[in-house]
Image (cartoon, grey):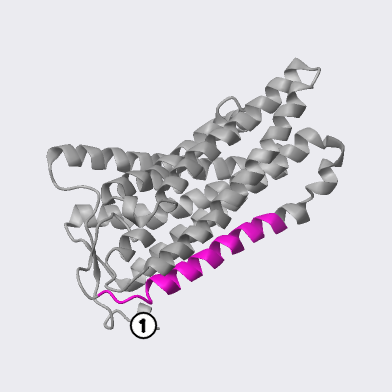
Amino acid sequence: MELWNHSAIPNFILSGLFSYTPHDFLLFSLILLASIAALAGNILFLLLIQADVRLHIPMYFFLGQLSVMDLTMICTVVPKMAANFLSGTKTISPGACGAQIFLVVMVGGAECFLLAVMAYDRYVAVCRPLRYPVLMNWKVCSGMVIASWIGGMTDSVIDVGMVFSFPYCSSREVNHFFCEVPALLRLSCADASLFEDLIYACCVVMLLLPLGVIVTSYARVLTAVMRMPSTEGKQKALTTCSSHLVVVGLYYGGAIFSYMQRASSRTPAGDRATSIFYTILTPMLNPLIYSLRNKEVSRALKKMMGTWVI
């Protein structure tokens, strides 16, 4: 394939996120620390889920998949950004650029579907507790996770194939810190308006349909929680669901702003700022959000720390 033949297509140039002023060195350090915190937090979360049998339930199975997605996103974007900044080089090969697009779109799409699956899981747990073992057995949970990954992968294959079908005959400088579909389309010397309409239609499927499932699920959960006679039951359900809703708000806010704007209303600076939000900050915050006020995770962490001390 021509995409992977580095001699057939000239390298792209990533303008990056920072220049080389003292202020930008400080900002780069903060971004790097946030990325390291995201890696450490998600790896620790996966280890906790694996080590404690009490966390071997569907909710934490889905959270583990969310951590895998966050780790993939961080490892796809940050190393190349950091290497380019520290070395002073800004080039990226077409193959590496295509790989970044593929992984970012795949993980982004899969996470949209996974968040909808997690919302449905909470709906069944709260509103259909007696049928929960049947409706959310391991076969069903595994099938929904696999379907989420397949949905994201399908979208990424379409995006990579279409993006590299356009000719890039003028500037090769991508005004971004990684290869993202809208940033590359700006460089095309062909009319990409039809593909932009296709992206918009895909976003309706990948973003708005799962968001509709999430809103419907949590609306029913909230109604059921308000009817609970037990104050402790209400508090536990609200604590769990509020954590999920915070993650949904953070992720969908950035994704909708990034991918559902028309090209005429987009700016490179806005795209870069939004991308930091969902590629670095959200993966860093997810483990914190799901561990705060979560007694099961706190108990598992204390148990692991006690094992290490001994």
Q: Quadrant of residue 133?
A: top right
Horizontally, residue 176 falls left or right of residue 23, namely right
Instruction: Name the one closer to the observer, 192 or 290.
Output: 192
Residue receiving disc 1: 2
Instruction: Point out residue 117 in the picture as x, y percentages from the top left corner.
Output: 66, 48
Q: Is residue 52 magenta?
A: no
* Helix, strand or loop: magenta stretch: helix
Instruction: Point out residue 203 in the picture as x, y percentages from the top left corner.
Output: 51, 56
Name the quadrant of the C terminus: top right
Horizontally, residue 19 falls left or right of residue 268, namely left
Instruction: Point out residue 92 in the picture as x, y percentages from the top left corner.
Output: 27, 66
Instruction: Point out residue 161 in the picture as x, y percentages from the top left corner.
Output: 44, 74
Vertical comparison of 192 with 270: above or below: below
Amino acid carrying label 1: it is: Glu
Q: Quadrant of residue 175?
A: bottom left
| Label 1 crowd bin: few (<14), some (14–19), many (20+), radius 10 Å | few
Q: How many badges with numbers are in the image?
A: 1
Name the quadrant of the N terminus: bottom left
Residue at the extreme left = 21
Instruction: Name the one closer to the observer, 177 or 51.
Output: 177
Q: Tag 1's secondary structure?
A: helix
Residue depicted at 54% across the width and 51% down the height: 207
Q: Is residue 180 visible?
A: no
The residue segment tinted magenta is 143-168
Q: Is residue 166 visible?
A: yes
Residue at the extreme right = 130
Residue depicted at 36% across the width and 83% down the height: 2
Residue depicted at 27% across the width and 47% down the height: 269
Instruction: Name the one closer to the observer, 262 or 1.
Output: 262
Residue depicted at 63% across the width and 45% down the height: 212
